[in-house]
Amino acid sequence: MKIHSAAILDPEARLAEDVEVGPGVTIEGPAIIGAGCVLQAHAVITGAVRLGKNNMVGYGAVLGAAAQDLGSRPETRSEVIIGDGNTIREYCTIHKGASEGSVTRVGNGNFLMVGAHLGHNVSLGNNVVIANNALLGGYVQVGDGAFLGGGSVYHQHTRVGQLAIAQGNSGFSKDIPPFTVAAEVNFVVGLNIVGMRRAGFSPEQRREVKDAFKLLYKSGLNIRQALERAREREWREHGRVFFDFVASAGKRGVCALKERATTKDGNGGADGD
């Protein structure tokens, strides 16, 4: 174990043998730090935080601080649980759950860039990229492979679907369906064709997602009618993922379509393939 002499470690904390702890790092309470983790200078880990294997926590990042919720108390016994292979860069903040026994959860292989914030009870999937200064309110859910642009903001309880991509400096109080490109304030502007290709979607799979997108957004039907029409067709996996997400949207609903020209890389238009 490589622990700098200027680090401050709570006796309740449990660290794997090969963890690296930089100068000024503070670990308060019964944190568990898995094998291969690196905690850079002045990172703070407080309370019941569990880090899996091979995570990097950057300079000045804070994990496990109290929820920013007026109904929650600092002494609330809740957790932050982080999987394996995550990169959490400088000054990121990840808050613990707001209610007793609740969890803020981060999966595996995620990349949180400088200044990203995960509010209380956020649930992050796997292989998500969150660019600089993106802000996620309480209970936000983000699906696998999503990309959240720099400076984008997400209202509490909103959801971002699998492989969705959100433009930088955008804002959302409605759900972003899987495989879409979202922009501005509560708009979807097309499909994440590049992301689907990189994820290994076949042309047939991309066509099915395109069909689902067109039924929801370009058929002239409202959401309820589009869902009824979708039930008349036998969808494969990704079509089902798309419509299951839409069907489970809460009272805020999903982002509306705003048409714009297809970009050269295939993102931003529903007709790209």
Image: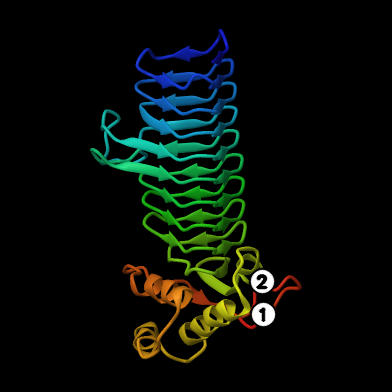
Numbered disc total: 2
Instruction: Name the residue tied to disc 2.
Output: 267
Asked if residue 246 is positioned above or below residue 198 in the image, the reply reads: below
Contact? badges 2 and 1 (CB < 8 Å)? yes
The residue shown at (37%, 42%) is 104
The residue shown at (39%, 73%) is 246
Instruction: Name the residue tied to disc 1.
Output: 272
Image coords of residue 77 (percent x, y): 26, 32
Please state which amino acid type lies under the numbered disc 1: Gly
Label whose residue precedes the other's in the sequence (2 or 1): 2
The residue shown at (45%, 79%) is 236
**Residue 33 occupies which quadrant of the picture?**
top left
Residue 2 has which mark? none
Q: Where is the N terminus found, in terms of image quarters? A: top right
| Disc 2: CA contacts within 10 A as few (<14), some (14-19) or many (>=20) | many
Image coords of residue 71 (percent x, y): 25, 41
Asked if residue 121 is positioned above or below residue 230 in the image, the reply reads: above
Q: Is residue 120 left or right of residue 88?
A: left
Image coords of residue 216 (percent x, y): 46, 83
- Camera-nearest residue between 60 and 232: 232
Q: Is residue 113 left or right of residue 121?
A: right
Q: Is residue 100 left or right of residue 118?
A: left
Q: Residue furthest right?
A: 264
At numbered mark 2, what does the secondary structure look like: helix, strand or loop? loop
The residue shown at (47%, 13%) is 8
| Disc 1: CA contacts within 10 A as few (<14), some (14-19) or many (>=20) | some
